[in-house]
Image (cartoon, rainbow, N blue to C red):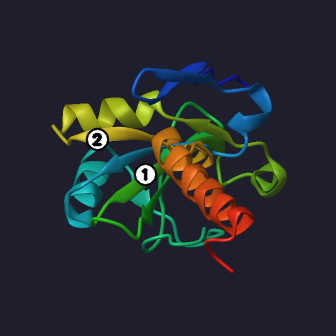
């Protein structure tokens, strides 16, 4: 079987200069997506122009929009792209992976490698504006809000201790 080499970012900017490392085991969890703020029809047209075709049978992810798209690469590989509806501000997330082609039985149990640069180049060729989105961003909390919350709780307990509040 021939190899398909791809690369994935090792370090990503998270928030205002804060950077984080992506560990090898996290790559399998599909942390990175490309976010676009255009109509899904424009994305679908760009994918079809690039040689992608609709996938008939697939395991759908939560919030997936319609069927995914697949494009044959060098034998036996293919790239699979999914469009996911992000429930905020009309954003669509694009996730892609390279896997063994559906023509082979091994496809069922094969390893899927998430890709981002290949999908990025397709969006750039079609002048589609995108942002890289990291699912781990939800793990970070703004420190200013946390300080205000902590201070408020401390003041309430201090007032209870002094006897101003019962």
Q: Quadrant of residue 27?
A: top right
Residue at x 66% of width, y 43% of height: 99
Q: Residues within 10 Å of mark 1 (few under 14, many from 20)?
A: many
Image side of residue 160 versus residue 122, left or right: right
Cα distance in 3D space between marks 1 and 2: 10 Å
Q: Which residue is mark 1?
A: 94
Report whether residue 99 is seen. yes
The label shown at residue 37 is none
Image side of residue 156 versus residue 111, left or right: left
Residue 149, percent from left and from top = 55, 55
Residue at x 26% of width, y 55% of height: 43
Q: Residue furthest front?
A: 163
Image side of residue 39 versus residue 97, left or right: left
Q: Quadrant of residue 8?
A: top right
Residue at x 46% of width, y 41% of height: 144
14 vs 77, nearest the viewer? 14
81 vs 49, nearest the viewer? 81
Residue 4, percent from left and from top = 63, 25
Q: Marks 1 and 2: CB-CB under 8 Å? A: yes
Locate the C terminus by quadrant: bottom right
Viewer-side label of 1, 2: 2
157 vs 126, nearest the viewer? 157
Q: Which residue is mark 2?
A: 130
Q: Secondary structure at mark 2?
A: strand
Residue 68, percent from left and from top = 48, 63
Q: Residues within 10 Å of mark 2 (few under 14, many from 20)?
A: some
Q: Secondary structure at mark 1?
A: strand
Residue at x 50% of width, y 70% of height: 64
> Does 30 sit above or below residue 157?
above
> Does 119 sit above or below residue 39?
above
Question: Which of the marked residues, 1 or 2, is nearer the chain's N terminus?
Answer: 1
Image side of residue 159 versus residue 147, left or right: right
């Amino acid at each position: 079987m021939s190899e398909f080499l791809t690369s994935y970012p090792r370090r990503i900017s998270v928030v205002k200069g804060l950077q984080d490392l992506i560990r090898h085991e996290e790559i399998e969890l599909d942390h990175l997506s490309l976010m676009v703020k255009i109509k899904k029809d424009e994305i679908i047209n760009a994918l079809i122009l690039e040689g992608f075709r609709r996938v008939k049978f697939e395991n759908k992810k939560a919030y997936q929009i319609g069927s995914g798209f697949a494009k044959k690469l060098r034998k036996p590989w293919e790239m699979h792209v999914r469009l996911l509806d992000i429930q905020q501000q009309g954003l669509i997330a694009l996730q892609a992976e390279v896997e063994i082609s559906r023509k082979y039985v091994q496809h069922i149990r094969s390893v899927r490698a998430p890709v981002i640069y290949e999908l990025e180049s397709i969006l750039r060729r079609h002048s589609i504006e995108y942002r890289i989105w990291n699912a781990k961003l939800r793990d970070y909390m703004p420190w200013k809000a946390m300080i205000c919350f902590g201070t408020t709780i401390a003041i309430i307990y201090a007032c209870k201790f002094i006897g101003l509040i019962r």
